[in-house]
Structure formats: structure tokens, C-alpha cells
Amino acid sequence: MTMRSEVLLIILGMAAVTYFTRFGCLVLFRYTGIPAGLNRWLKHIPTAILTALIVPSLLLPKGYLDITIHNHYLIAGILAALIAYKSRSITATVGLGIMAMVSLNWLFN
């Protein structure tokens, strides 16, 4: 298996950008600390990224918008969101979400 040089350059470029942005933030906030407003804003980044990754796969499982009862991904996702809201447990959320998806596929396929 060979790696194309473009892929290697992209990986190295992404690593350099990641390193320098993190290093730059450490240098910038080393003595002053992170401003409170920026710190509050940064706490929402993981939620926003996770939502941006998950929502398209729930709403567009076949490449087009499907908000019907036949979209098992959407139903299992809504159930998992409710479980996450009520339990605040990632284990329960992932476990019951997977069980919902398997059950829906088994029942309707």
C-alpha cells in the first residue's frame, strides 16, 4: 500500500496548523488567562461540532431529506436525544440508541 504524496502533504499541513494554533493560544493566554467570555463560548464548541456531524446523517440517510416515520435513523436519534436529556449518561444514550436502531431495523426490514 502506497500513500500518495498529496495525502501526506495534507496530513502534514493539518498537523502543522493544529500545532501552531494550539501553541499560539498557549503563548497568547499564558500570562493573562482565557477571557471569561471566550471560555464560555468555547464550552459550546464540542456540542456544535457533534450536532453538525450527527444531524445530517439523521435527516439525510439516503441522500435526500427524509423526515417520515420510515426514517429509522431519525427515530433512533430522537429517542437517543430524549434518553441523553433525561439520564445525562453517555452509556445509556449510546446503548439504548443502538438498541433502538437494531430493533427498528429488525421490525421493519
Image (cartoon, helix red, strand yellow):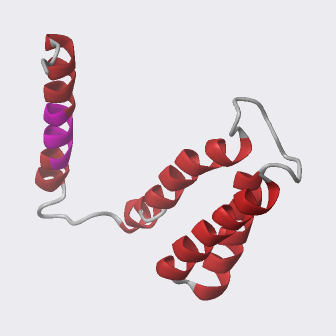
Q: Nearer the viewer, residue 1 or 77?
A: 1
Q: Magenta-highlighted stretch: main secondary structure?
A: helix
How far from the left and from the top, in percent, is residue 27? 11, 52
Along the viewing direction, whichever of 72 and 64 lies nearer the viewer = 72
Image point (21%, 19%), residue name: 7
- Give the total of numbered labels: 0
The verdict on residue 47 being magenta is: no
Q: Is residue 25 above or below residue 87?
A: above
Q: Residue at x 85, y 50 (%)?
A: 70
Q: Work out whether 101 lies above or below 9.
A: below
Percent x, y of residue 52: 56, 46
Residue 29's x, y, as percent? 18, 58
Which quarter shows the N terminus? top left
Depth order, front residue of 27/45: 45
Q: Which residue is drawn at the image coordinates 64% and 48% (left, top)?
A: 55
Q: Residue furthest top?
A: 5
Q: Position of residue 81 (x, y in %)?
A: 67, 69
User: Which residue ends up furthest to the bottom in the rendered image?
Assistant: 87
Q: Which residues are magenta?
A: 15-22
Give residue 43's quadrant in the image.
bottom left
Q: Residue furthest right?
A: 68
Q: Quadrant of residue 9?
A: top left
Q: Is residue 58 left or right of residue 36?
A: right
